[in-house]
Amino acid sequence: MELLQELIKIDHQAEMPVYIQITNAFIHHIRAGRLRKGLRLPGSREVATLLGINRMTMVAAYDELKAQGWIEMLPRTGTFVTQDLPVLKPGRIKEEEKVFTIPAKPSFHFDEKHIIPVFSSDFPEGGKIILNDGFPDSRLAPVERLVSSMRSLVRLATQRKYFMYGGAQGTEKLRHILADFLSDTRGLPVSPANILVTRGAQQGIYLAAHTLLQPGDHVVVGEPGYAGANLIFRYTGAKIISVPVDEEGMDIDKLEDICKKKKIKLVYVIPHHHHPTTVTLTPERRIRLLELAAKYKFALIEDDYDYDFHYASKPIMPMASLDRHGSVIYIGTLTKTLAPAIRVGFMVAPEQFTTAATHLRKAVDTQGDSLLENALADLYKDGTIGRHIRKSVKLYKERRDHFCNLLRTELGAHVSFKIPDGGMSVWTKFLSADTMELSANAYRKGLVMGNSRDYDTYPKRYNSVRMGFASLNFREQEKAVDILKGLLR
Ligand SMILES: Cc1ncc(COP(=O)(O)O)c(C=O)c1O
């Protein structure tokens, strides 16, 4: 049994108690087969002598091994490695049992420059007022109705199959309903085959971009623009070209100049309430953009993330509804309609492209949440979503007016902004205060607010922030503005 001396090494400097070290070593060697099943083990006194430890320490180790089922002690016969080794159940490892912690850095090489940090990915902090980037008020979302629809669905035998693999394109039920909804409300001539249900607009843009782009391809985006989309394009290895966005949306003359000089593979536009400036692309520019897409054969991602929330008049018809050539990849989302964490959106495109993007989706994400998709289909069908949109638009319009009024009366000397026609945020320029400093100070006073670094595209600095009014009630808005007023004074 000198073998034990070889196998069991004790570190007397380690924080881990010696009896645990011995226990772990025995387990390790039993599992590795070095101490075979049924092997007779020496008594605790003998092992203690071999290892140069106190006998009571060895008794404690054997007791622990016995308790865990690794050894058995037969009266007047001896100690043996158990014939039937314990079935290991994963359980929480006690702090003192941890032999090592997972190293912070891997042993293999990966190129960290591929990881491009943008926005914070933490949930909003409780107990603070959150002036977000322009998100809906999740307190209004019909979640009870959604949950009750899910509950009804799980009781139906016909729904059992939706717990299995399938439906990478989204459930047929939701795609049918969406096809009707998009045709009725946005004039989109679509069939369910054109639709890919995604996890929000972000995944739609990602799938479209990665289906389409090769490293080195040229992509045109608006400046300032949506960092989340630019991030996706950077990940594809495409070259990003910026075109200014003015009061009427993307400058189409500038875009045409670029098309004359370079082969453009993709143009990304946000037609309603451009991110971040909130302007809406005019009908004239929409038509010219479609003509250019057909002429220069580029794909057009129309990210209509905010379509429903127009306050001045009805929203303008999407370019996808006029697209005779098959240039447009139309993206929409329910995350802005209901709540950001209800991750369902859609991509609408010519069928062949939708199929290709579905294959990619299957590779990265297998499929969406079929039960959630079918429950949402029920909410479309029974009018819940339609009613929710109408109610939210009415309320957000009041909140926009109240917030803009507060900005004008309370912070008028410090900010400049235009009242947005739609969307959920006000693009606010701070005239003298540095937004980085302001948001850090506001945080200390209980107000969470972004800063202009979220929108700057170096070397361009805007010193502006998107101030989301939709998710704050009047009282919360007043508190937020009051904090800013105190800081700007
Ligand atoms: C312009 C734009 N597109 C897409 C998205 C992503 O939306 P989703 O949460 O549906 O993925 C956002 C989110 O704020 C956005 O502002």
Image (spheres, rainbow, N blue to C red):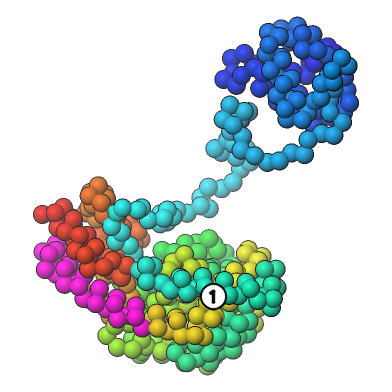
Query: Where does the N terminus fall, quadrant-wise?
Result: top right
Magenta-colored stretch includes residue 451: no
Which image quadrant is residue 348 in? bottom right
Magenta range is 390-417
Where's residue 56, x and y in %?
A: 68, 11
Q: Amino acid at mark 1?
A: Ser
Which residue of the protein is positioned furthest toward the front in this rendering? 75
Task: Tell me if I can see residue 346 in this picture.
Answer: no
Residue sitting at x 47%, y 77%? 332
Where's residue 164, x and y in %?
A: 70, 68
- Nearest the camera: 361 or 482? 482
Where's residue 46, x and y in %?
A: 79, 8
Residue sitting at x 69%, y 76%? 157
Query: Where does the C terminus fall, quadrant-wise?
Result: bottom left
Image position of 482 (left or right of 452): left
Q: Is residue 2 above or below residue 291?
A: above
Query: Which residue is the site of mark 1?
Result: 149
Please, what secondary structure does the residue beneath circle 1 have?
helix
